[in-house]
Amino acid sequence: MVKKRIRSVCVPGCDHLRIFEADQPYHSTTQKNYFAEESGFIYESISARLVILHCMSNGTYTTGKMFKVLYEVIDKVVKIQGTVTSPSDSVISGNITSPNFPQGYALNGETFTYMIQNLDPYGHIRLTFDDWDLAEESEIQVYDDLSGNSRTSVLHRGERPILVSNTNTLVLVFNVGEGTYASSSNIGFKATYYLVAGSTWADKPLTNCSSTYLMQSGGIIKFSGVSSRIHQFYDCVWTIKRYIANNPDGVIVRIDKIILGDGWLHSAINVLDINNGLTSIDPLIGRYVSTNITVGTTLHTSGKGLYIRLRGAFYSSDVINLVYTAVDNVTNEGCPNPKDYICHNLWCIDKDLMCDGVDHCGDKSDEVCSMPDLWNLGWSGSLEGMAAELTTLPPCHGHRCTDDKRCISPSQVCDGVFDCEDMTDEARCRYDYYSGSSSVRLSMKILSIPLMFLCVFRTLL
């Protein structure tokens, strides 16, 4: 394990104690100054390595400078007990979290223990991990009693676990492990426990549909049920996480496809939640059920990413596709990255997302070249040839006209004026036309004006 140099700054000119943890990321979240008037306060550390720094001013006192600190070494054990007291209280629940969740934990070789006990000797415990992001060096050992001799499983990063105890006791021992870096970039875990009367879990969900996606450029999340005859319960968590080498202005996620099958239509528990962040405790920005979920719904975040959770009972007829895209804002100079593609709605996306069969822009402008309508025109031109020709031109930070390859400013796109001879600067734009007290909204869906002319000429011939 790499030991980082401890650095802490005192408040100049003041006599005080500065207490902080030696390991990051605990140091940043737990450091605190204690002055004379704060006598009697209690500081409880997360880990076993604590630093007490005596910061002194230049002044002297006849009685001298002194302090007294009482300390106690305690086990890193969380103990939880409870019972179902009546038939109406069929479930009692609560949460446990990894140390310092969700700011991450230190890879300092320590262990943390969680003991959950149902006081009903015939009761059981269910455990659902709402958040699951462990480092490769970490593991959780699971035991079915307090003796430590009945280990049932060892959990590692990867598939998100879901547990039900064999007895009335469940013990988790979290070994954080030791790594090359003293601090883990992983968030850790948060789990919800349920104290229940019986061991049967009829609606125990599948969680193997969960996954993490890097906000590298873009992609698509696809889900459908397995069986067409009986429903299956699912609890899918998808996190879209910022990529360390890519720092876009934000990410957009759009409901690209939704088929309301038997599960969506008949199960009242089906729900899609989207949180603005990487964890289940981040702010909820969208909740969708069968009555309000629609294709085209789009959410945007400029934060660390998105936490998406789909729960409920689904058949194979239930389908949902979510498209996510890392985006930058267009400036007067164009895209921050000159190689990016400017959507007609003025989002900048990775050029590699063009023509991949997925509408990443949201207005389909990045997929004009892959639309089947083009091939129905009988056009024998080569898109690869066109791409090769465009790569020989100087970079365009706005929109390039198709006919004369002229580059125009982003502000001239969709402004109601045809600045290009081929009128491609106004393709796929939406305008409002007013006549007296009435108005008519027309949506122009121009794939490519020259190709439309080709179609007309071919018909005339």
Image (spheres, rainbow, N blue to C red):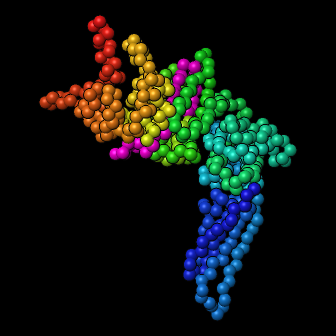
Query: What residue occupies the far bottom of the structure in this picture?
Result: 62
Q: Is residue 377 left or right of residue 284?
A: left
Query: What residue occupies the far left of the structure in this picture?
Result: 436
Locate the N terminus and report the quarter of the image it occupies.
bottom right
Point out residue 366 in the picture as x, y percentages from the top left corner.
42, 29
Query: What residue occupies the far top of the structure in this picture?
Result: 461
Question: 312 or 352, which lies in front?
Answer: 352
Queried whether the magenta region covers residue 331, the answer comes back as yes
Q: Is residue 53 left or right of residue 245?
A: right
Q: Residue at x 75, y 45 (%)?
A: 139
Q: Residue at x 64, y 50 (%)?
A: 185
Q: Residue at x 86, y 44 (%)?
A: 149
Locate the C terminus and report the quarter of the image it occupies.
top left
Asked if one can make out residue 13 in the rendered structure from this viewpoint, the answer is: yes
Query: What residue occupies the far right of the structure in this picture?
Result: 149
Question: 92 or 136, which lies in front?
Answer: 136
Q: Residue at x 63, y 72 (%)?
A: 18
Point out residue 232 in the picture as x, y percentages from the top left corner.
62, 24
Q: Is residue 205 above or below residue 179?
A: above
Q: How many marks?
A: 0
Q: Is residue 100 above or below residue 293?
A: below
Queried whether the magenta region covers residue 231, the answer comes back as no
Point out residue 59 in the picture as x, y percentages from the top left corner.
59, 88
Question: 93 or 45, which lies in front?
Answer: 45
Q: Is residue 409 left or right of residue 14?
A: left
Q: Is residue 55 above or below residue 137?
A: below
Point out residue 163 in the picture as x, y percentages from the top left corner.
71, 37
Stretch in magenta: 310-337
Asked if one can make out residue 301 in the rendered structure from this viewpoint, the answer is: no
